[in-house]
Image (tube, helix red, strand yellow):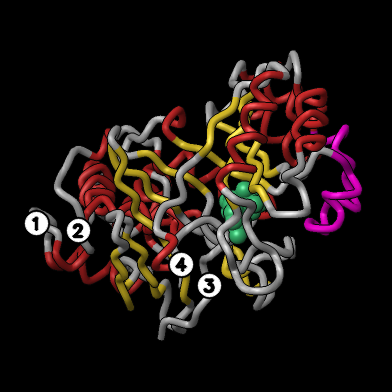
Amino acid sequence: MKNIYDLSINELKEHLVSIGEPKFRATQVFSLLHKGYEVMDMPTIPASLKEKLSQDFYTKLPQIKTEQISKDGTRKYLLELDSIGTLVECVLMTQEYGKTVCVSTQVGCKMGCVFCASGREGFVRNLTSGEILSQVILMNKLQNDNANTMRIVLMGSGEPLDNFDNVVRFFELVNTKDGLNISTRNISLSTVGLPKQIHRFADLQTGVNLCISLHASNDMVRQKIMPTARKYPIVELIDSAKYYFQKTGRRVIFEYSLIDGVNSALEHARELGALLRGFPSHVNLINLNPTGGALKPPSREVAMKFMDTLIKSGVSCTMRKSKGQDIDGACGMLKLRKTV
Ligand code: SAH
């Protein structure tokens, strides 16, 4: 059964007309739906229409199975998405400048990065555009402040560019004027780095911020920790990032998780500097969040030296604070422990 959150406002119009309802109802229903009202709870909509919609579509918002609250205020939710009990995680973070929702785009992941827990149980399925959207709607409903201050990051479980069409459609839905109306400038998509899809995404000129998970300054190191690096050399990846910048004017962000004894030596910082110098980009450094196994983050001191060296080589860079580590809600930690 189709999820009602998958529908664009025009599709909802077409559906309502096809069942003999006036068109104006579509804007009302769409708007209420995106504000967080479930169909059966909608005010001002006739009961007969609510019944019809409930018969034609899956109309539930994700059900919260568990909520974990970190010392830093980050909240991690385990959500049930459908009638067969499909589970994904979603994280709500509070920063000085507002709230950020981190959404999942797939159940599991195919990419197999060794430091990340999300793909360890394999790949199950893509989320639909409505299933990605309904995570945002639910998070927005759980808080009282203005939806416009909300930022969205596609950094939960899954590889967004491996679920291309649904993700692009999600951007259209979340950006709709009568819905949440969240600007694509406030959305960041993080990808493992799939050059062809990055080109395709650039051509769409969505205005979304692109983050590329680089995590290494040369192919040898990258291949050790990211299986996709065997297919796509770093030069090809940087070329696609340059294309993204040319097409969109948006500065690309490279993510670099520091792993002790793997990618955090000063020679790596210099190599990374040489690779990115002169390209309008920014590096987000983060100390690895431990996900079991042998990989560990370097000491704070080593991390700071890495950052200094990179800055000295002319690359813009910041060290990101990890959020929600104590509840396994931080980068790469989703799906680490079974919580039900
Ligand atoms: N599939 C997307 C989204 C992944 S999660 C991607 O690959 O970008 C978002 C970020 O967290 C990515 O940069 C990912 O590489 C990083 N990450 C994964 N596991 C991590 C860990 N254990 N510690 C720190 N960052 C991690």
Position of 245 compared to 156: left or right? right
* Image depth: mark 4 or mark 1 in front: 4
Type of secondary structure dominating the magenta stretch? helix
Kindly state the secondary structure of the residue where label 1 is placed: loop
Instruction: Judge: label 4 CB < 8 Å from ligand 1.
Output: no
How far across and how far down the image is residue 143, in percent?
19, 52
Disc nearer the start of the sequence (2/4)? 2
Q: Amino acid at mark 4?
A: Asp
Give the alpha-carbon distance from disc 4 to disc 1, as whole Å.
38 Å
Q: Disc 2 on helix, strand or loop? A: loop
- Report the mark closest to the observer, 1 or 2: 2
The residue beneath circle 2 is 37
State the residue at coordinates (30%, 71%): 67
For label 4, the SS is loop
Residue ID for mark 4: 328
Q: Specify start and end residues of the magenta stretch as a single range.
A: 218-237
Asked if labels 2 and 1 touch by Cβ distance under 8 angstroms, the answer is yes
Location of residue 23 in the rendering, given as x and y in whole percent from the top left corner = 27, 43
Q: Residue flagged by tag 1: what amino acid is it?
A: Pro
Q: Are marks 4 and 1 in contact (CB under 8 Å)?
A: no
Identify the residue shown where x is 53% and y is 65%.
333
Location of mark 1 (residue)? 43
Instruction: Using the rendered image of the protein, determine whether residue 221 is visible from the camera's viewpoint.
Output: yes
Residue 102 vertical position relative to residue 175 in the rendered view, above or below:
below
